[in-house]
Image (cartoon, rainbow, N blue to C red):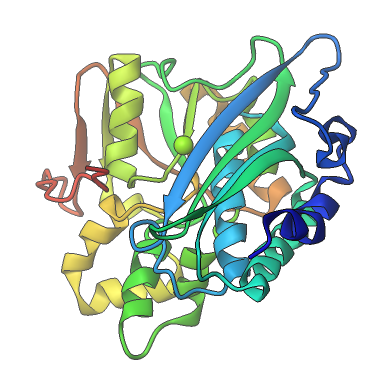
Amino acid sequence: VDEFGLIAACFKPLSKGYSGSLNLTDDAAIVSLPAGQELVVTTDAISAGVHFLGNEEPALIARKLLRCNLSDLAAKGAAPLAYFLNVMLPTDTTPEWVHGFADGLRQDQAEYSIHLAGGDTIATKGPATFSMTALGVIPAGKMLRRCSARPGDIIVVSGTLGDSALGLISLRGAAGDEYLINRYLLPEPRLALGKKLLGLANASMDISDGLVQDLGHICEESKVGATIRRPLLPLSKPAAAMIKNDEKLWDKIVGGGDDYELLFTVPASKKQEIGALAAKLDLPLTVIGEIIVGDSVQLLDENNKTVPLANKGYRHF
Ligand SMILES: [Mg+2]
């Protein structure tokens, strides 16, 4: 694979919409911000065989990588600006594969108004690996944090939980559910919601490691506890049907990860605004419990009994 030819053919067009990229012709990019705004920066790395199966369509791998980064920007209330991409490809990668990957990026760049600002490509003897860094903008001082949940806050999640984890099971099985598989392959970054949470939410993050573990992160950083109620957890129809057949799958709902929904806390006095926002965005926003004085996450079942939490989320190491 000829690196410079590939960059020109595949990646340069992706930088056109962002003038600071200098069309990928210089050593570095330029990022300028309007007065009163600051940068929110997030980065993610994924590797074949660990974070994706490896046999997916290259466009889908690219889109999920971009969307996971955008999900972090959404969780912080930031608007997408530009991204940097490092591509480490096995030496036997075909140009068609790279074109497919770039096509996926082009598709989602248009959908989410973000452009490539720079990056690097290298050949590797290891598995395909990608690292992306996304930049977002936000009014200075307003980024939504994990450390600012307060006892008495209600805990809210967007969308439905566990679809992605169940989708991965589906994908590995013989007869998969298309909706769930799609939720695993193509998460939807909740950017419109994130923007609306500025000035409304006390704490916010996106769910990537599983509800219980990620809520644990908010509790740890905010030095509070949380009680969530299983009957309140929002499930899609296919997920509810799978749970009905196998109650053990609750573990996947609360700990499966890869949801890329927003998890946030709001003062109880603003509960009504959540309902109005859900209607406005046409996105389910569900109150699943409350922040309490304490230091742990407690999950209660249908009979108000504490559910032992076997699967606390995805472990990176
Ligand atoms: Mg995150």
Vertical arrangement, residue 8 with respect to residue 36, above or below: below
Residue 195 visible, this orientation: yes
Q: Quadrant of residue 290?
A: top left
Q: Position of residue 281 (x, y in %)?
A: 70, 48
Q: Nearer the viewer, residue 233 or 295?
A: 295
Q: Position of residue 81 (x, y in %)?
A: 76, 34
Q: Nearer the viewer, residue 106 or 186?
A: 106
| Count of picture labels | 0
Outermost residue to the front: 2
| In this picture, residue 277 sits left or right of residue 296 | right
Q: Position of residue 198 (x, y in %)?
A: 65, 24
Residue at image position (43%, 82%) is 177
Residue at image position (11%, 50%) is 310
Residue 190 visible, this orientation: no
Vertical arrangement, residue 227 with respect to residue 222, above or below: below
Q: Position of residue 229 (x, y in %)?
A: 28, 45
Outermost residue to the bottom: 174
Quadrant position of the N terminus in the picture: bottom right
Residue at image position (45%, 72%) is 180
Residue at image position (79%, 23%) is 31
| In this picture, residue 59 sits left or right of residue 13 | left
Quadrant position of the C terminus in the picture: top left
